[in-house]
Amino acid sequence: MYPYYGWFILGGVDPKGGHVFSVDPAGGSIEDRYVSVGSGSTFAYGVLEEVYGRDISVSDGVDLALRSLTVAMKRDSASGDGYTVSAITPKEYREFSDEEINKRLKSLKIPLPPVLP
């Protein structure tokens, strides 16, 4: 058995509003307005820092996440080749289907990820 180390993003909503944390492998956490982790995070942060604003809508936030992930995947081979996107609001937790993600990618003019066998 090998130890595995992970860097996580933890988010949620409480009576004070939405929160997102970066949780490092040692258990330390930092709260911020947006978070990116992993080897491609510097590329994702380039997009996030340029576009993010406190008044961003959930829909625009999802599109921003897709743009950020796409840049990370293009510039960092360890960032994978697919998307998993969820939205957390005071009213709901929602996971986006591959079909919904692909529709957004098309509207953003981002090439669709390859279909794996």
Image (spheres, grey):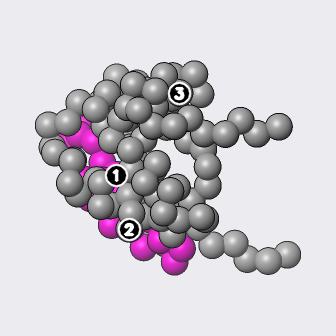
Q: Nearer the viewer, residue 102 or 62?
A: 102
Q: In the picture, which quadrant includes the C terminus?
A: top right
Residue 113 position (above or below residue 39): above
Q: Disc 3 marks which residue?
A: 102
Q: CA distance from mark 3 to mark 1?
A: 25 Å
Query: Mark 3 or mark 1, which is nearer to you?
Result: 3
**Relative horizontal placement of residue 49, taking residue 114 as reference (left or right):** left
**Residue 115, position in %: x, y?**
71, 35
Q: CA distance from mark 3 to mark 2?
A: 24 Å
Q: For the residue labelled by badge 2, is the local secondary structure a helix, a strand or a loop?
A: helix
Q: In the picture, which quadrant includes the N terminus?
A: bottom right
Query: Mark 1 or mark 2, which is nearer to you?
Result: 2
**Residue 110, position in %: x, y?**
45, 37
Q: Is residue 88 magenta?
A: no
Q: For the residue labelled by badge 3, is the local secondary structure a helix, a strand or a loop?
A: helix
Q: Which mark is residue 42?
A: 2
Q: Residue at x 34, y 52 (%)?
A: 20
Tell me the magenta residue range: 13-35
**Residue 56, position in %: x, y?**
20, 36
**Pointer 3 local density, CA inside 10 Å: few below 14, some 14–19, many at least 20:** some
| Amino acid type assigned to the residue bearing label 2 in the image | Thr
**Residue 13, position in %: x, y?**
33, 39
Looking at the image, can residue 33 be seen?
yes
| Amino acid type assigned to the residue bearing label 1 in the image | Val
Q: Disc 1 marks which residue?
A: 20
Q: Residue at x 32, y 61 (%)?
A: 45
Q: Residue at x 51, y 37 (%)?
A: 111
